[in-house]
Amino acid sequence: MKKHTIVALVQDRPGVLTRVAGLIRRRGYNIESLAVGHSEQPEISRLTLVIESDHVEQVVKQLYRLIEVIKVSDVTDDPIVEREMVVLKLHAPSSVRHEIVSMSGVFEAKIVDVGASTMIVEMTGTPSKVENFIEVVRGYGIKEMMRTGRIAMVRGARGHNASEYVENANGSGVVPTLN
Amino acid sequence: MSEQMTGAQIMCEALIREGVEVMFGIPGGAIMPFYFAMWEYRDRLRHVLCRHEQGAGHAAEGYARSTGRIGVCIGTSGPGVTNLVTPIADAMMDSTPLLAICGQVGSHVLGKDAFQETDITGITMPITKHNYLVKDANELPYVFKEAIHIATTGRPGPVLIDITKDAMQKSIVPNWDIKLNLPGYKPTYQPNRKQIREALKLLLQAKKPLIIAGNGVIMSGAADELRHFAEKLRIPVITTLHGIGSFPEEHPLSIGMPGMHGWVHVNRAIQTCDVLFNIGGRFDDRVTGKASTFAPNAKVIHVDIDPSEIGKNVKVTVPIVGDARATLLALLEEMPAREELADLHSAASDWMEHIREMQDKHQGKQQYVNRADTLHMTLPPHDVYEKINQTLALRGNYRVVSDVGQHQMWAAQLLDWNAGPRTHITSGGAATMGFSVPASLGVAIAHPDETIWVICGDGGFQMTNQEMATIHQEGIKNIKVAIINNGYLGMVRQWQELFENKRYSGTPLSGPDFAKLAEAYHWKGLTVEHSDQVQAAIDEAYATDGPVLIDFRVEREVNVFPMVPQNSSIGDMITVDP
């Protein structure tokens, strides 16, 4: 099955993440990664999903059925910038610290914490570069690892501009935050 | 309006502003403030006290399906709302506009496993079009407006609002100046004109075209437009279970129902057609059989307001996203001149002749009447349908609510459906046994001047018959129930007979004396055991000024034919030759 990167803009209301994740599970697709955060508009959140499926068109259509989902696209074959971050706590006795520091330099990773026998390294890059880095440092002993999941953005003028979807007037009535 | 109102008063006011007149429900601890407030509004907002929340939900569905307006049901927190889950799921499957109003525990104890607390928004997330948890009275005017807008527009569906008790009790000054903020919800009503022309091009070249009409035609009010369209092109029309009523069966272009218990000539026509125009149907597996073998020679044009239905089950050549009525109007506008239709008309006429030949060969409805194996029976089920059918045609002014099972398929097959849209009400997608009696309550309240016939099995009847008490208490007189009582869960028994070597595991079913049960509920109860008594009982039901139940004790082991075994091609039907 092919892996697809999907970008979605959603209304920032409580439960929206549960709705998206629940729908994908119910329809029998597997989420490999899911990253959520603010977009450039305060009331709109942005998701990047990586899904394994041969019927990604159905996934996109089903996501559109959710009331709070504003725009969904499969950007897998588009020109995109993809990034992922990993934070690793490595087993790092003084004997190997130099090696880890120089290896981190090659991958443009940052040392963000040094303890008595551990180091925390932070690294950002394309998913494959992150994968490479993890393999390279695995030999030192990974005590903890946290990956953020992939985030994606289409290059150039095309893309997912959240401000296009903000209604300019909301009446004088209360538009509740719905929390 | 600038005076203070409680949240519960705002709920009543919001419902009245949206045109709601009737609600079906049961009170309980968490929803009490709403019941306290609705007493003041009782002249404008009728509350019907049901005996079980499932009954309230189906009653609201019956109201909605027979009117096209939103049906409203109410339950309290915990078991009250979990009892609403089945009708909500039913409404989701059959695209019924339903509003479920639920009381929730106070916001200060929310999430603490308080008395009668259930996470109903979590439970119903997959079976609602949308749902809300409201903890602040200020949100109520907006949420009620948005909820009813979502439930009734686009592809309709159930919406649930869960409101904490303190939000209902709090007094605030409501603001009714509301503009909906739904950037992600803009249903497409108008079809793309290029696609309309593509569809017409395909239809004009067709030699063996077919129309399938589904629920969407009824929901969008497109029955007249469908008739004009079919007549202009002279294309045969198939009506699905939920499409029944969208096109009169007496019309020369009507050929009947497709699918698992559809007619042989209809399924054969689908398997040989070259262009299939599906408007407002969703290619359910009970229609398609094994989808990969469905309509193998056809180019498919699929019209649906929900884009996710298009291409989901069947490969589509011309997809059209739009409202059924708007699409048919656009097709009629783009219709070429009469001369250009000549080729299609001549091909369609040969094609229709071929379908009618198949129909004569396989007999359709007639095969039941002529079946040799029923001659020894004292009360074959088809005799009941024959008499009900004749009576309905004679007396008119009726709607039929069927339950789920063999009797439901016989009703769809054997009655002549000519009374128009929203006169056949049944649970299709979810196939919820126990739907019919409570649903008829909603239908009867919406249509007090019509006779509402319930056709029900003895299994389904026993699931929700407590609503007979509600029907009596509300003084409803226009419901007549026909139980097709065969002492089995008959459809399962039929499968066991045909595919499991008659291992009748869990299907033989006893019941009470249904006529006596009806009498206990202050109804009239009648029992019929012989074909000769059928008409007299039906006439007595009409002559009685009140609800009537007739227990038709039919032959026990009769099967619904024709039949497509599950996951087979609809070309392979089990039939019974006359």
Image: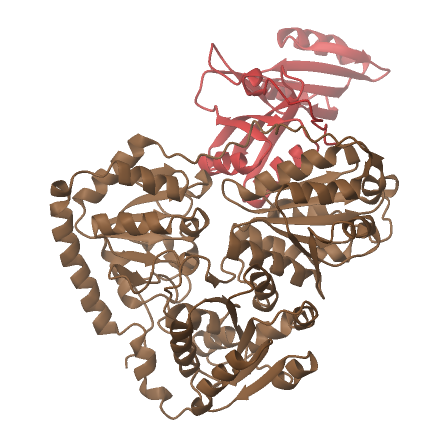
**A96 left or right, relative to B557:** right
Compared to residue A172, the image places residue B140 above or below, namely below
- For image coordinates 63% across by 18% down, the residue present is A39
Say which of B485 and B31 sits in front. Answer: B31
Colour of chain A as rendered = red
**Figure chain in brown:** B
Compared to residue A36, the image places residue B66 above or below, namely below
Could you tell me residue B199's position as x and y percent? Answer: 27, 39
Compared to residue B82, the image places residue B372 above or below, namely below
- For image coordinates 47% across by 74% down, the residue present is B407
Residue A138 found in image quarter: top right
Could you tell me residue B479's position as x and y percent? Answer: 56, 71
Question: Which quadrant is home to the N terminus of chain B?
Answer: top right
Question: Which quadrant is home to the C terminus of chain B?
Answer: bottom left
- For image coordinates 32% across by 55% down, the residue present is B293
Residue B266 found in image quarter: bottom left
Say which of B98 and B524 sits in front. Answer: B524
> By what rule are the colours in the image chosen?
by chain
- For image coordinates 36% across by 53% down, the residue present is B213
